[in-house]
Amino acid sequence: MRLFISLFCLLAGGAQAATHFEIVGANAGAWPAVLTSVGLLPASGARADVTVIPEGAVADPAVWLKRVDEGALVVLTGASPLAAALGFQPGQGALSVRSVVDERAPKLPIIWEKTESLPVFALSSGARIFVRERWSKAPLLAGVRRGQGAVLWLATGPGAQGHEKFPYLPQALAEMGAVSPFRGNSLTPTALRACFPASPNICNKSSEAPFATTGWSVYPAALLTKTVIFIICSMASSDPVIDFTALKQLMIEARAAF
């Protein structure tokens, strides 16, 4: 409910909407799916409001620092000269990462399908950390504001499907400025679609709304949902099917919430 209120205020507060994204380099990965999930469109010649620079992509720090100062949102992964210039400095040691904690749902276990060895990064004092490694508290997803823009940094990519490692990534994008006007029928709660991702593996008695769906939404209608029991154990994806029983229950809970 707190997430619903904060996002509602953000959307209603008159923030300038981001509408287009671009990805630097040829390795787009799952980023198009992640960014379209928050209502953004490929730039296709238009000036991008959100730019993703995957690890290994060539990016001149002087050029991109200026773009951020002028109002762009830049998304970085891993170590790079640009990340270092923004305060994301890799240390000498490495850390085996599999279990992580997201600040939006700190009691919800998030376990990656495979362990990854990642550098331990030091962040600038003004950075906001969204996700940490569970035991060492090392930062894995963080944001920092600079000038009129912002930067969202990930220690590693979001995964092949886009939701395996950082399931609340769209909410972090929204909080850093990737806010788009409502589009199409995105107001339909995706939690009503009876399909599940292959990972991450999660077993918990309760969870907050955005984790109840195979996709993502930062829209209020989806954020009204609240699951009682939520278990995913490496299930294969299935085609979305509307569950009208769940729809009826959602309508009852939404009326009760107000």
Image (spheres, rainbow, N blue to C red):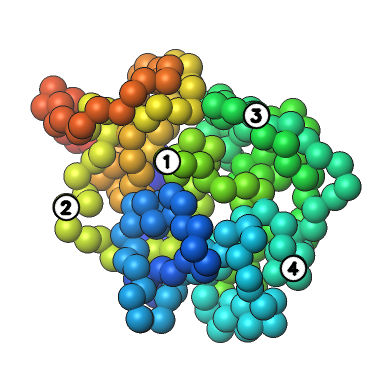
Between discs 2 and 1, the one toward the N terminus: 1
The residue carrying mark 4 is 81
Q: Report the mark closest to the observer, 2 or 1.
A: 1
* x and y, in percent, of residue 96 in the image: 74, 31
Q: Would you identify the image quadrant in which residue 197 lies?
A: top left
Gap between marks 1 and 4 measured at Cα? 27 Å
Q: Secondary structure at mark 4?
A: helix
x 70%, y 69%: residue: 82
Q: Given the image, on which type of amino acid does mark 2 rest? A: Asn
x 62%, y 51%: residue: 154
Q: Is residue 228 left or right of residue 81?
A: left
Q: Is residue 252 left or right of residue 191?
A: left
x 44%, y 74%: residue: 49
Q: Is residue 126 left or right of residue 141?
A: right
Q: Answer yes or no: do the residues labelled 4 and 3 have beta carbons within 8 Å?
A: no
Gap between marks 3 and 2 measured at Cα? 37 Å
Between discs 3 and 2, the one toward the N terminus: 3
Which disc, if any, is residue 161? 1
The residue carrying mark 2 is 185
Q: Answer yes or no: do the residues labelled 2 and 1 have beta carbons within 8 Å?
A: no
Towards the viewer: 173 or 207: 173
Q: Secondary structure at mark 1?
A: loop
Between discs 4 and 3, the one toward the N terminus: 4
The residue carrying mark 3 is 115
